[in-house]
Image: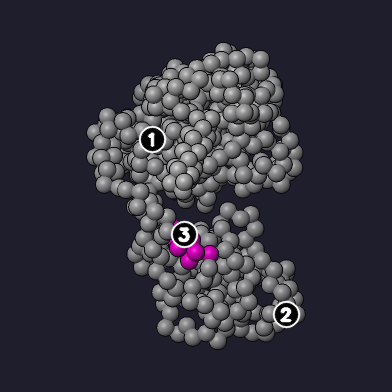
Amino acid sequence: MKKIARSGIVLLITFFFQSLSYAQIILPKVFGDSMVLQRDVAIPVWGNAVPGTSIVAQLGKIRAATKADSKGKWMIRFPKFKAGGPYTLKISESGKANSSIELKGILIGDVWLASGQSNMEWQVQQSKDAKSEIAKANYPNIRFLFVEHDIKLTPQTDFAAGQWKTCDTNNVKQFSAVAYYFARKIHKEQNIPIGIIQSTWGGTPVESWTSRDMLLSSPITKNATLANDTLTVQHFANDSLNMTRFWDIVYQPQNNADKTIPLPDYNDAAWPSVEMPRLVKDFGIGNYEGMMWMRKKITLPASFGGKDLVLNIGHPEMNYSLYFNGVEICKTIWNNNPKQSYTIPASIVKNGENTISLRIAMLWGGGGLNPPADNIYITDGNDKVTLAGSWLYNKDIETTMPKIHNYHYYPSVLFNAMINPVIPYGIKGFIWYQGEANDGDAYNYRKLFPMMINDWRQRWQQGSLPFLYVQLANFKKAKDLPSESEWAELREAQTMTLSLPNTAMACIIDIGDADDIHPINKQEVGRRLALHASKLIYKQNTIASGPVYKSFKKEGNQIRISFTNTGTGLSTKDDTEIKGFAIAGKDKKFYWANAVIKGNEVVVYCDKVTEPEAVRYAWADNPDCNLVNSAGLPAIPFRTDTWKGITQK
């Protein structure tokens, strides 16, 4: 009896799990409540079930049916819908109402995939006018799906985590600022729902976002892609543990360092000194990554006594914590924080000598205090005491940083985990902001970037889907003389990509920040992308681009440059003389040039170049340039020569 009973229980359990499996219909996470589906295309919906299962789906009043194949995969394509909603999507096993999935609050509109590195990832709450923008962000017909960071060695059918969210004052904070301002403008102008699928990861090269098959097709990327074959999931797991440890060190002082080092009587006699402000690459200590402690003793005038003081630390390049006479003033502040000055309460200020301590991260080749020296000081509101000059430092106090491989930089791993799972969700097009991570390989970017665009288009099978992208902004210290530039060459590669059909580029050479790779004016970036969408996709009669170089002609000791996209005429942004042009002869030595607007052309010349051969405009990391068209949009950087650049191997 016991044997029979036991067998019966096993059969019941087996039947239960078979029934559960049979009833189970699985949808990938790209589908969810509050999603936006693409209008005017056959809407694809797909998932998994037990092989042979009959699937019935209903969107609004439209029903469709299919059957799961031998691998359990199924797909339904609804007919074209016009913009509108809300709708409910019901998916069930034929004849089994209790097996249904029901998704609510669905809108039909235009869906855009927003991707790239940190400037596309940069959040609304980190950007310009964040407080006021968040307060008025009530757009229930704008929806965002944020695809969580993940890496995989093979293409996935679903992403790790993410769900659709409606745009309101709570959710908008973490949305991509560029994508949000793009979506907002299109939504207002077209009066349709807008969906954004945000799949972004800071610091990543274009190769990470491209499929293995496409990368293997190019000699530029083939070997690096094949090297991925030596990786295993364990490599990723170990790196994840190291990353956790890495950030624990950044955020939490090790060995109780914060309890002793900031104290005024701490013995720092053996510490080396360095003149500040400067960055770690200029310390003369070679490559260093880790947490560094810095100390400076200052003597305050008697007039500062009994007052709350303000200490301005300028513009630190990385994470830092600040201490005054052993008291923690701030902890783990990043350089994008809008406030870099702090109140020093009178109760901790001493007559005469006081001690300032910094715990500062030196990471990824960067770190330290950015010039100018005038930006670091302490004040009582009337007088200032500079903090520039000699500081003591020690880089060997805390735990050594673990080695991080940053596998998310590796070829195809982001495509596998964060792009492939979204294919073939119906979309209107792509918006893209990336390139900083490829600056040292700018020449190859001429092929790498179009490769990725073609890769995505082929896999979506929606034809030449619109691909709108942002050109690199002006960044880094401005140079006094014309010089070569990796960033200029990367911008050139981006401009050359316009040769692909149905592409457009937003030039932002005028709104960058010399000291911050993440310029905060994302409103204008989103607006300029939206201008291109308005013209290219929505067929509005608008000027979407600044002047674009067309051709040049030598005229004695001058070169005449012709442009397209001039609108009603060329001018300068500030109504001053044109800046940003350089000219060279056969010796390839460039000099700053004079430039004069003549209609839709610019005549360029320089007394030092009697037989000119080439002209360059805005050819620098951070060029001083001001040529615009009648819409106030900046001229796209260019050069007339094809001389070998510094990134061409």
Q: Identify the residue position indicated by label 3 in the image.
A: 244
Q: Verify CB contact (< 8 Å) between mark 1 and mark 3.
A: no
Residue at left offset 35%, top offset 52%: 234
- Amino acid type, mark 2: Ser
Mark 3 neighbour class, 10 Å CA radius: few under 14, some 14 to 19, many 20 or more = few
* Of 501 and 207, the residue lying toward us: 207
Left or right: residue 473 versus residue 304 is left
**x and y, in percent, of residue 573 in the image:** 59, 34
Asked which colour scheme the image uses, the reply is: one colour
Cα–Cα span, label 2 and label 1: 60 Å
Report whether residue 89 is seen: yes
**Earlier-in-chain disc, 3 versus 2:** 3
- Amino acid type, mark 1: Pro
Mark 1 neighbour class, 10 Å CA radius: few under 14, some 14 to 19, many 20 or more = some
Cα–Cα span, label 3 and label 2: 38 Å
* Of 321 and 545, the residue lying toward us: 321
Q: Verify CB contact (< 8 Å) between mark 3 and mark 2.
A: no
Element carrying mark 1: loop
Total of numbered circles in the picture? Answer: 3
**Earlier-in-chain disc, 1 versus 3:** 1
**Earlier-in-chain disc, 2 versus 1:** 1
Mark 2 neighbour class, 10 Å CA radius: few under 14, some 14 to 19, many 20 or more = few
Element carrying mark 2: helix
Q: Identify the residue position indicated by label 1 in the image.
A: 155
Left or right: residue 134 versus residue 328 is right
- Amino acid type, mark 3: Thr
Q: Residue furthest front?
A: 1
Q: Identify the residue position indicated by label 2 in the image.
A: 347
- The answer to whether 384 is drawn above or below residue 75 in the figure is below
